Amino acid sequence: MKIELAYGRTGLELSVPDTVRATVVRKDTLPVPADPARVIEDALKAPVAARPLEEAAKAAKSACILICDITRPVPNHLFLRPIIERLTKSGVPLSGITVLVATGLHRPNLGEELAELVGDPWVLENVACVNHYALNDEDHVMLGETPTRKVPVGIDRRFVEADIRIATGLVEPHFMAGYSGGRKVIAPGVAHHTTIRTFHSARFMEDPLATSCNLQGNPLHEAQLEIVRMLGGTIYGLNTVLDEERNLIFTSFGEIIESHAAAVEFVRDSIEVNVGRKFPVVVTSAAGYPLDRTYYQTVKGMVTPIDILGDDGTLIIVSECGEGIGSAEFREAQKRLVELGPEAFLQTLLKKDFADIDEWQTEMQLKPMRVGRIVLVAPALSEEDRAVTGVTCRDDVDEALREVLAETSAREIAVIPEGPYVVPFHRAV
């Protein structure tokens, strides 16, 4: 049996031996609209729980539009110009419009990468397209603390002070915040580093409700909602949903919390897949380009399938990792994991109010490590990078599978071609 896995830009074929039964876990197929531009247009014309954008913009002199960074395959080319043209028709000057890349604590997207991200030369030529820098104190307005969990709140002043504020993004499973998009594009997207490092600390990360597809009682989600409310006024959200082939299948637009909830409601039944059992071997991916450019992002693909991985099972994950391990800070966290071991590493985190930058991803790697063994297929990783992954590394996915099958005598496996964009679970039916 041949199964195509998401890997880089080209994909990677997995060959499953005839003696092995493979359960392939995919999203439910949803209809693909013939005209994606019309989907955007219809959403902009019918805002959820908010007045029309054109009406809100009549007295405005400035606008800030947030977009996700290069790690998310958001179809910015479809909606940025239509949004900007609506603003200018209502009197907002082009010189007053900023497209702000919500980098969080990721690296900035510059040059050709920024052009790829924006996806529309007209936008680049006519409005300011800039990156958020979480470590620049002067770029932020400090708003106090969230009422419930006392998270210090700092948000990029270009967003805070704009007359019209719009957050755009992709609604997909997120292994900490439940679902991406909406409020998450603001925080951590354009938040101060103390905000990001607080709700990525162990008191949030170790909460069992901070998990994929869960919004009820999720401490990150609740903190993000409080931050939105602290900002006050109307914040618009434009939320996109893509299928496995990256086709736009749904868009919601309107008040940021309500429009995000509408997108989650649309996609939830497709993304959350009950397979009814656990497996001794699970083969998955890091979702291909752009998510699998680094090992840092690859961890997401390790976490989302653990509900169907049997105790002491083996998780095989493929990832291109063409940019290597990730940030220098993440490398240091991974080194500490390897040197200290999982339990001692976790104990160092529990003592902190502020997480060190990017160490939260290492903390998330502990979750699948508690369940079973991880085998990473990322031939582009250097030996130096492999040494700090803390997992078993192999160069070929077919050889890795054969090796695991020989060691375990397993004859049933689960395969998740799209990786963390699909969340399998094993609830009995």
Image: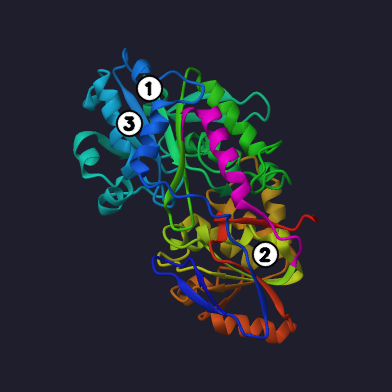
Instruction: Please determine whether, in this image, residue 51 is positioned above or below residue 213.
Output: above
* Mark 1 or 2: the one toward you: 1
Q: Position of residue 277 (x, y in %)?
A: 76, 63
Q: CA distance from mark 2 to mark 3?
A: 50 Å
Q: Which residue is mark 3?
A: 83
Residue numbers of the magenta segment: 252-278
Residue farthest to the top, as pictured? 59
Residue at the location (57% across, 57% down)? 420
> In the rendered structure, which disc, 2 or 3, sits on the residue that comes first in sequence?
3
Q: Nearer the viewer, residue 134 or 308?
A: 308
Residue farthest to the right, as pictured? 428
Q: CA distance from mark 1 to mark 2?
A: 53 Å
Q: Position of residue 169 (x, y in %)?
A: 45, 41
Quick one: SS at disc 2?
A: helix
Q: Position of residue 139 (x, y in %)?
A: 38, 31
Amino acid under disc 2: Leu
Q: Which residue is mark 2?
A: 340
Amino acid under disc 3: Ile
Q: Position of residue 39 (x, y in %)?
A: 40, 38
Amino acid under disc 1: Leu
User: Which quadrant would the C terminus be assigned to in this image?
Assistant: bottom right
Quick one: SS at disc 1?
A: helix
Residue at the location (36% across, 16% down)? 55
Q: Nearer the viewer, residue 374 or 198?
A: 374
Which label number is shown at residue 118? Answer: none
Instruction: Please determine whether, in this image, residue 26 is positioned above or below residue 194.
Output: below
Query: Mark 3 touching mark 1, by CB under 8 A?
Result: yes
Query: Mark 1 touching mark 2, by CB under 8 A?
Result: no
Judging from the image, the colouring scheme is: rainbow
Which label number is shown at residue 53? Answer: 1
Determine if residue 389 is in view.
yes
